[in-house]
């Protein structure tokens, strides 16, 4: 009974416990509640992924209403990978959150943070398990609205404008998605994705469907911060509380990519997306621009969180580049990088949170000589940074290998060179930090700084450990990603 | 212990030693004992393998498979055996030297120094015993990263600049060219295993193979072929033992070792002969030999002169790989060993002079042979070996290289080697001459009664061993020669 309801539990448990967190007046209880829920969510996610891995795609009718009338939850390999990412990051971030939130936020906001976090978790998980286009929109908005609140809770007043900017951009994106889904409903009379995919080919050659496709693509591109629609992202990541930056950077944009994949390959099909709408060429161009421009901008950023935010824009470029190849190898490379980048960025933002806790700043000029005071945090940053660059034995290397070989297999050798050259740009911006913390003379106040507490170091190193583990033994992730790509493309290609 | 486990232990031992070294950071003597013990054990382990390898055994072991079809695994073959023997033996000597040098010089961060040194040697063992190109690449990158803290050991601005150049060149070339070549080779052939006769023959056209060869030769930045050689002079900001073992032996030889491995086991020398780029790259290597020697001639800083000389000598080995004849392969393999002994002796001497007299410039070293006769005698042995004068080790490798060049009628290679021999003499002999036959006029410090005496004993011990080795290898070259001949036999 319990096992057959896993897809619903995945969403319902965090949703139901969110108000509970708000009702618990004591911040520590609220945190405890969020912590337990995160771990339960991870346990459910692991069971769910195992079921999908062994038994294939799971279809679940919510409230036992038969599809296509009721809402269907549909978990295939691609969803399973996303569930795993979101639940893992959530479970690792929560133990870390207590000290960081306590330090950065006013006590009266603490309950709110955990409530919004659980809502955000609900939304993100909901997006990836649902098989219903409108339900997907609803969950996407649950996650977006809660993340606007989370970002606005940042310790400086600039967090408010950052959240507002995100709110405006995010709402435009949401509206576009809603218009797109509305047009699809108008033309087909259904909202179930599988049903949509069967009915769309009859009407595919109409202007309405093309417009719907365009609206959805642009709307989702805003959510996933595809260059040049990324302008909300750097501020949002910079001024959000550290925990929120880590959680959102690792999950929210990735879920955006997932939505894009769903629409491209499941709702529409690959032939329509890439042959009729020529999205491949556009995405490839934008991805290349994102990789180059955002990496170069990152090199010149002095705020390290902001630098990492621009780096995220570039890394999203890599993921989109893989997808734009429209081959099984390309899409699975994109999905592998999706997972690996979530783990890398999560770890790097957590390291930044440790620094912010002790130093009160993540500006490069304040971090001079920090490595002597916080050796473990900085070592974590270096390993995470090397993984971002794609040094062997880290997960970033696995991503890079798959991306380059996918590009070469399809004959795009300039892309292969671009991927390799741009990984050196990552080396430059990571090494600026390394040189500042290891070589520059420490300031007068530096000797007072202590190493971060264990409750924050352990989660950070846990994510670093995940990076190293999947750099040496990538079978699991590459297997899931390949099968996910096959599921996505298989529906389109006979 | 079965040979497979020994191979694994050879890689694991130096990679695990840093944990113990770091744990003992409060007690310098036990800490250094760990380094000495590890290096000694490592050499014995490596040495215990050589008999079996000479008899044709190829102990192999696979660990994990990060990417489908690409394993991290080890396999010992003659060239790797030779390289591992060389690096592990010289590590023992360098450890003795390091202890003397670091203590006399009152260097800071000695714990991290010994830790990263052991890590670097572990990476070298991984390169030497790599069972496929993928494993080799992983340890190649690890070697770059583990030597970065050693290069920047001083922690000042010069070290930071040097480190930047070091990392930029080495990671830049390996990530852009070498990794591209790897993925490309893999997508063309579906394997990155080392096989005698190569894996590319028959799988690609000579045009594609040309591109790949260019990517490989320039991608292996550690071989320091012009124009990707500037990291080596930049690395001279490191403490002298690092320059001696890593930037005259382990790191640079890892580069040319990789070149030889790729030439023999990825291309196969028969296929290499059919590739148009081989000839062009030979010209590049020849140009590197001559240009770097000319630059060396103009250096006043002793370590820099030695570094430029290394750049020049490394291209001998690259040239050997491109000669596409078994005799050339023998010459290249031998030159790895012979050059290593001579060059490490020269660096040891440079370090001894620095520790004893604080001098780094050649122009200040007039008459230094009277104060430090033992050191400068060893320096002379090293210099003569670099020139290729018998009875020094350098003569043997040069002999085989010339033999190989004549065999394939490459008279221009013969000319380059003769010219470079003259240049070697031109930049080494004046140092020897000035040290012994000039008096240090206007240089009161050498005359000063307080500033008398030779280098510390531990330094002299290390110098003596490598200098004796340089002479000894002329008379008893059997072990390296047998391994090199077996390698050439396998490559036919």
Image: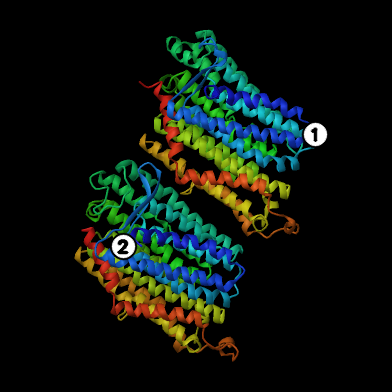
Residue receiving disc 2: B79
What residue is shown at x 35% (from left), y 54% (from top)? B61
What residue is shown at x 56% (from left), y 33% (from top)? A43
Say if residue A227 shows up in the picture.
Answer: no
- Dot 1 crowding, Cα within 10 Å, few <14, some 14–19, many 20+: few
Foreground tag (1 vs 2): 1
Query: Horizontally, is A361 left or right of B432 in the view?
Result: right
Q: Secondary structure beneath disc 2?
A: helix
Say if residue B55 shows up in the picture.
Answer: yes
A317 in relation to A2, above or below? below
Counting from the top left corner in percent of width and height, residue A255 is at: 56, 29
Closer to us: B487 or A236: B487
Closer to us: B220 or A49: A49
Q: Disc 1 and disc 2: Cα gap in Å?
A: 69 Å
Query: Horizontally, is A395 left or right of B212 in the view?
Result: right
Q: How many marks?
A: 2
Residue receiving disc 1: A108
The quadrant the C terminus of chain B occupies is bottom left
- Dot 2 crowding, Cα within 10 Å, few <14, some 14–19, many 20+: many
Q: Please state the chain letter of the residue tagged with numbered disc 2 in the rendered image.
A: B
Counting from the top left corner in percent of width and height, residue B340 is at: 38, 70
Closer to us: B10 or B188: B10
- Label annotation for residue B232: none
Q: Residue furthest front?
A: A1
Q: Secondary structure beneath disc 1?
A: helix
Q: Are the residues flagged by discs 1 and 2 in contact, CB closer than 8 Å?
A: no
The quadrant the N terminus of chain B occupies is bottom left
What residue is shown at x 38% (from left), y 73% (from top)? B341
């Amino acid at each position: 009974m319990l096992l057959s309801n896993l897809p619903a539990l995945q969403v319902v448990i965090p949703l139901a416990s969110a108000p509970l967190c708000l009702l618990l007046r004591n911040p520590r209880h609220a945190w405890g509640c969020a912590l337990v829920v995160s771990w339960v969510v991870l346990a459910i996610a692991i069971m769910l992924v195992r079921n999908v891995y062994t038994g294939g795609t799971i279809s679940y009718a919510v409230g036992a209403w038969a599809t296509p009338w009721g809402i269907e939850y549909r978990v295939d390999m691609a969803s399973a990978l996303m569930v795993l990412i979101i639940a893992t990051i959530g479970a690792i971030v929560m133990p870390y959150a207590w000290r960081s939130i306590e330090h950065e936020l006013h006590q009266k906001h603490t309950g709110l943070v955990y409530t919004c976090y659980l809502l955000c978790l609900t939304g993100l998980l909901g997006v990836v398990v649902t098989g219903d286009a409108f339900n997907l929109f609803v969950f996407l908005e649950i996650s977006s609205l809660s993340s606007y609140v989370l970002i606005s809770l940042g310790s400086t007043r600039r967090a408010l404008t950052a959240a507002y900017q995100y709110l405006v951009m995010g709402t435009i994106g949401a509206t576009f998605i809603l218009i797109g889904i509305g047009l699809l409903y108008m033309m087909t009379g259904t909202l179930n994705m599988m049903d949509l995919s069967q009915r769309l080919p009859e009407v595919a050659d109409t202007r309405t469907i093309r417009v719907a496709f365009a609206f959805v693509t642009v709307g989702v591109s805003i959510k996933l911060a595809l260059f040049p629609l990324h302008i909300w992202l750097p501020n949002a990541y910079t001024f959000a509380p550290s925990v929120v930056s880590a959680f959102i950077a690792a999950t929210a944009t990735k879920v955006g990519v997932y939505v894009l994949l769903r629409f491209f390959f499941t709702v529409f099909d690959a032939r329509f997306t890439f042959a009729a709408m020529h999205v491949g060429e556009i995405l490839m161009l934008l991805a290349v621009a994102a990789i180059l421009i955002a990496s170069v901008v990152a090199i010149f950023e002095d705020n390290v969180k902001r630098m990492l935010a621009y780096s995220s824009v570039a890394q999203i470029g890599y993921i989109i580049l893989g997808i734009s190849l429209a081959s099984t190898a390309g899409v699975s490379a994109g999905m592998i990088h999706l997972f690996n980048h979530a783990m890398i960025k999560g770890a790097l933002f957590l390291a930044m949170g440790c620094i912010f806790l002790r130093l009160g700043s993540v500006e490069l000029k304040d971090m001079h000589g920090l490595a002597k005071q916080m050796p473990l945090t900085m070592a974590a940053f270096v390993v995470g940074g090397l993984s971002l660059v794609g040094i062997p034995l880290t997960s970033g290397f696995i991503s890079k290998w798959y991306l380059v070989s996918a590009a070469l297999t399809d004959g795009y050798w300039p892309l292969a060179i671009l991927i390799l050259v741009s990984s050196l740009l990552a080396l430059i911006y990571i090494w600026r930090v390394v040189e500042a913390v290891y070589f520059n003379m420490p300031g007068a106040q530096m000797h007072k700084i202590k190493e971060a507490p264990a409750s924050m170091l352990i989660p950070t190193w846990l994510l670093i450990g995940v990076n190293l583990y999947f750099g040496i033994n990538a079978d699991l992730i590459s297997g899931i990603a390949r099968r996910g790509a096959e599921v996505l493309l298989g529906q389109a290609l006979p | 212990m079965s040979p497979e486990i020994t191979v694994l232990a050879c890689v694991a031992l130096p990679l695990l030693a840093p944990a113990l070294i770091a744990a003992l950071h409060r007690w310098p003597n036990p800490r250094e004992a760990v380094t000495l013990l590890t290096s000694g054990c490592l050499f014995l382990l490596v040495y215990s393998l050589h008999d079996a390898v000479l008899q044709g055994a190829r102990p192999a072991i696979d660990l994990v498979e990060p990417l489908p079809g690409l394993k991290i695994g080890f396999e010992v073959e003659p060239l790797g055996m030779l390289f591992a023997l060389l690096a592990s033996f010289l590590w023992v000597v360098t450890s003795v030297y390091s202890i003397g040098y670091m203590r006399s010089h009152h260097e800071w961060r000695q714990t991290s120094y010994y830790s990263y040194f052991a890590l670097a040697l572990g990476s070298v063992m991984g390169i030497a015993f790599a069972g496929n190109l993928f494993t080799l690449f992983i340890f190649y990158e690890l070697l770059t990263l583990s030597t970065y803290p050693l290069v920047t050991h001083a922690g000042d601005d010069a070290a930071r600049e040097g480190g930047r150049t070091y990392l930029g060149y080495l990671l830049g070339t390996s990530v852009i060219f070498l990794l591209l070549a790897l993925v490309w080779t893999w997508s063309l052939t579906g394997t990155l295993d080392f096989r005698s006769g190569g894996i590319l023959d028959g799988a690609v056209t000579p045009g594609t193979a040309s591109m790949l060869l260019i990517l490989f030769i320039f991608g292996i930045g550690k071989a320091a072929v012009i124009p990707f050689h500037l990291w080596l002079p930049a690395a001279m900001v490191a403490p002298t033992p690092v320059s001696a073992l890593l930037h005259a032996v382990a790191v640079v030889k890892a580069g040319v070792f990789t070149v030889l491995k790729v030439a023999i086991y990825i291309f196969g020398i028969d296929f290499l002969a059919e590739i148009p780029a081989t000839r062009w790259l030979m010209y590049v290597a020849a140009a590197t030999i001559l240009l770097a020697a000319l630059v060396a001639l103009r250096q006043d800083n002793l370590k820099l002169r030695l570094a430029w000389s290394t750049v020049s000598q490394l291209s001998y080995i690259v040239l050997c790989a491109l000669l596409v004849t078994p005799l050339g392969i023998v010459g290249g393999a031998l030159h790895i060993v012979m050059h290593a002994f001579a060059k490490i002796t020269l660096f040891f001497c440079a370090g001894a002079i620095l520790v004893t007299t604080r001098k780094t410039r050649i122009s200040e070293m007039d008459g230094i042979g009277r104060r430090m006769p033992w050191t400068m005698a060893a320096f002379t042995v090293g210099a003569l070996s670099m020139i290729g004068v018998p009875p020094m080790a350098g003569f043997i490798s040069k002999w085989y290289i010339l033999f190989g060049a004549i065999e394939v009628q490459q008279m221009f290679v013969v000319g380059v080697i003769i010219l470079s021999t003259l240049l070697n003499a031109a930049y080494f002999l004046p140092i020897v001459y000035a040290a012994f036959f000039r008096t240090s006029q206007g240089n009161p410090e050498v005359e000063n009664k307080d500033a008398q005496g030779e280098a510390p004993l531990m330094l002299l011990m290390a110098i003596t061993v490598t200098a004796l080795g340089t002479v000894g290898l002329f008379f008893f070259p059997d072990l390296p020669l047998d391994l090199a001949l077996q390698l050439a036999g396998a490559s036919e």
